[in-house]
Image: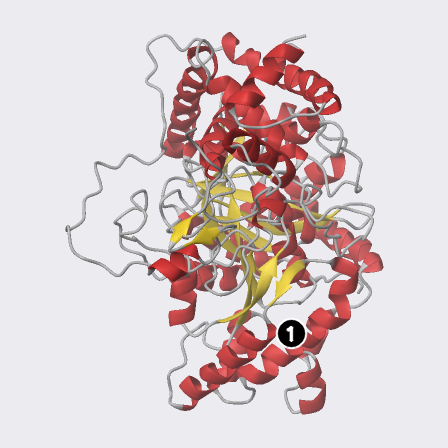
Amino acid sequence: MKITKEEVIHVADLARLDLDEESIDRFAEQIGEILEYVDTLNQVDTEGVTPTSHAIFLNNAFREDEERAHLDNDTALANAPEKEDGGFIVPKVVG
Amino acid sequence: MSGLLCFASGYAVTSGLVFASSEALFKRSALQAERSLSEALLSPINQKEEYRMKLHELTIHKAHGLLKKKEISSVQITRAVLDRIDAVDKKVSAYITVAGDTAMKQAELADKAISKGESRPLTGIPLAIKDLICTKGIKTTCASRILENFVPPYDATVIQKLKKEGAVIIGKMNMDEFAMGSSNENSGFKLTYNPWDLARIPGGSSGGSAAAVVADMCLGALGSDTGGSIRQPASHCSVVGMKPTYGRVSRFGLVAFASSLDQIGPLTKDVTDCAILLNAVSGFDNNDSTSVPKDVPDYTDALQQGLRGITVGIVREYGATKGLDPDVSYAVNNAVEVIENLGAKCIEVSLPHTEHAVAAYYVIAPAEASSNLARYDGVKYGFRDKEKTDLMDMYKSTRSKGFGPEVQRRIIIGTYCLSAGYYDAYYAKASQVRTLIMEDFKKAFDSCDVILCPVAPTPAFKIGENIDDPLTMYLSDIFTLSANLAGIPGMSVPCGFSKEGLPIGLQIMGSHFGEEKILKVGYNFEQATDFHKKKPIS
C-alpha cells in the first residue's frame, strides 16, 4: 500500500477532516492507487527544469492605491452561520 | 496523409470518401434524433404562432437579429425558456436554481433598452450560469452542501459584464461539487441526465450547463474549465464549448478550485454564439491579478470562410491512447479530413510528455484545491455544525459533513502532496513536468496553427459505471487537461455520433491567445457539416 491508514488519518487531520473507519479504508486504497500512478512522474528527467506555477507569465500586477467601495458590515455578515454585534461568532478559542 | 492522421482505430478513412462517410454518420445519428428542431428555425418567419412556440430553440445570434428587428421581445423568449425548463428539466435535472422572477424583470428592462435602440448582441438573451460563478442575490452553491444556502453579496466580473450587455440570467446550473469531476455524479444535490440518453452522464463538471444548452433550456451558458470541464460535457452533449487562454477571462467571483488552471468560458449552440459570448466576458480585470492586460479583438471577425494558409497539427502520441473508442477515432479522423478538404494543411506534431500530463495534473490540481478549500471553516459563510462547541471539532465536523467524498479525496491528496517531506517528490516534480508539457505545446505551435484531437476517449458513459474507480475517471481527462496545464485555449465542436447515437466532439487547441484561429477552424468545420443542428429526442 502506497499510503497507510495512519497516514490518511494524519493528513486528514492536517486538512481538518474527520473520517470514519470506512472512509479511511476506502481512501487509503483509492489514494494509494492514485499516488502509485503519480509516481510515474519519476520516469521524467527534470534535472535543471524550472518549475511552472502559472502558465502565463505576468510581472507583479499593481494598481493605484485608491479608496474603493467595499461591502458594508451587514452585507459581509449576511451569510454567517452565527453572528452577533456585527461580528462572527466562533466557539471559544482560549480557555 | 490519411494513414498518418488516423487515430488508433479499426476504421480507415480515405480522402475521397470523406463527405460520403460523414453523410453516413448523419444518417446514423438521424435515426437516433428524429426530431430536428432546426427545421423549425428554417421555416418561414410568417408562421408567427409556430415561431413563438420555438423561441427557446433560437441561437443567440438569431434571437438577437429578431430582437433588434422587434419581431420578438426578450419577455417572450425568456417566458419560452422558462416554459421549456418546466417541461424538460424534470427529466434532465440541469438546474439547481431557476431565477424566474429576476429573469423576467431583466427581460423587461432589456425590452425597454431595445425599444430605445440599445440592442447589444446579448441584450435580452436568457443565459444559464454554472453554479460556481457568483451571482448577487442568487444562490451560488458549487453543488456543495457546504454552500447550500450561500447567497453572494456581489456579482462575479463576468456576471457584471453580462448584465452590462443586458443579458438575462435565467438560473444556476448543476455541476460536480466544486467542479471536481467529469460526470456530474459528484454533485452534492442531484444527478444531471444526458438529454441524448437519460441513462448516461452529461459529462462534467459543467454538465448542467451543457445539458441545458442542448435541451434548449437556455440560449447559451457559462461554465468553467479546470481540466476539461467545459469541453468534455460540450462533447458529450453536442454543443460548442470553449476554454479560453488562462487570463483571458477574469476569475473574480469564480469560486476557486485550482487557481492556476481555472478559466471561465462559453457553452453555446454554435461557434458564432461562442464568439459572441467570448466577446462579452473577455478582458483584463483589476480584481483578478492573473487576468492579462491585453486588448480583446472582436472574435466574430474570425468567423470567415476558408482555411487556406491554416496548418493543423495532429498529435502523434494521441494515436496510441489506450481505451480510445473506435467511433470517436472515426468521427475525429473524419473531421480532420473535412478540415483538410476545406483548404487546411495537415501535419503531424509531437507532444512527447503527453503520458505524464494526467499524473502532473492530479498533483497540481488537488494541491491547489486543498489550499483553496481551506476557507470553508463554518465561520464566515456556508454550513456549520453548530452541535460542536470546540473550535477544532467544529472545523472538522463542518468540513466532513459539508464536503462530499470526491472533494475530501482531493483535499487529502493535495494536502499529502504539499506536506513536509513529500512536497519535492510530488508538487515540485509535477510543476517541473508542467514546464515540459508547456514547452511541448510551444514547439508544436511553431509548426502549426491549431491542434486537432478528440475531447474525450469515449462518448458519454452510463451513470454509475465509473463512480467507484476515481483513477479510471481521471485517466479519461487525457486529451483535455494538458491545455489547462499549458494555459492554452481549446474548444469542442460537435463532429459526429457513435453507433449508439451518442455525440462526439472534436477538440481544437491553439497557442496562448490563439482563440481566433480556433474559432475560424471551428466555424468552417461547422458550416461544412450538420452535426450541431442535430437535437436529442425530448
Identify the residue at image location x=56%, y=40%. B228
Q: Where's residue A16, x and y in %?
A: 54, 28
Depth order, front residue of B212/B530: B212
Which residue is depicted at the point 62% across and 34% down? B400
In this view, the residue in front, B12 or A24, is: A24
User: Is residue B222 found left or right of B148 in the rendered image?
Assistant: left
**Which residue in the protein does label 1 denote?**
B81
Image point (46%, 50%), residue name? B264
Image x and y of residue B214, in percent:
67, 61
Disc 1 crowd rating (10 Å Cα; few below 14, some 14-19, many 20+) is many
State whether residue B5 appears in this view. no
For the N terminus of chain B, the image quarter is top right
Q: Secondary structure at mark 1?
A: helix
Give the answer, above or below, for where A29 lies relative to B508.
Answer: above
Q: Classify A34 as above or below B72.
A: above
Quick one: which residue is furthest to the front in this view? A95
Is B201 situated left or right of B64 in this image?
Answer: right
Please tell me in which quadrant of the rendered image residue B98 appears: bottom right
Amino acid type at image mark 1: Val
At a point 74% along the width and 46% down the height, the residue shown is B201
In front: B365, or B189?
A: B189
Where's the C terminus of chain B, which quadrant? bottom right
Image quadrant in which you'd find residue B104 = bottom right
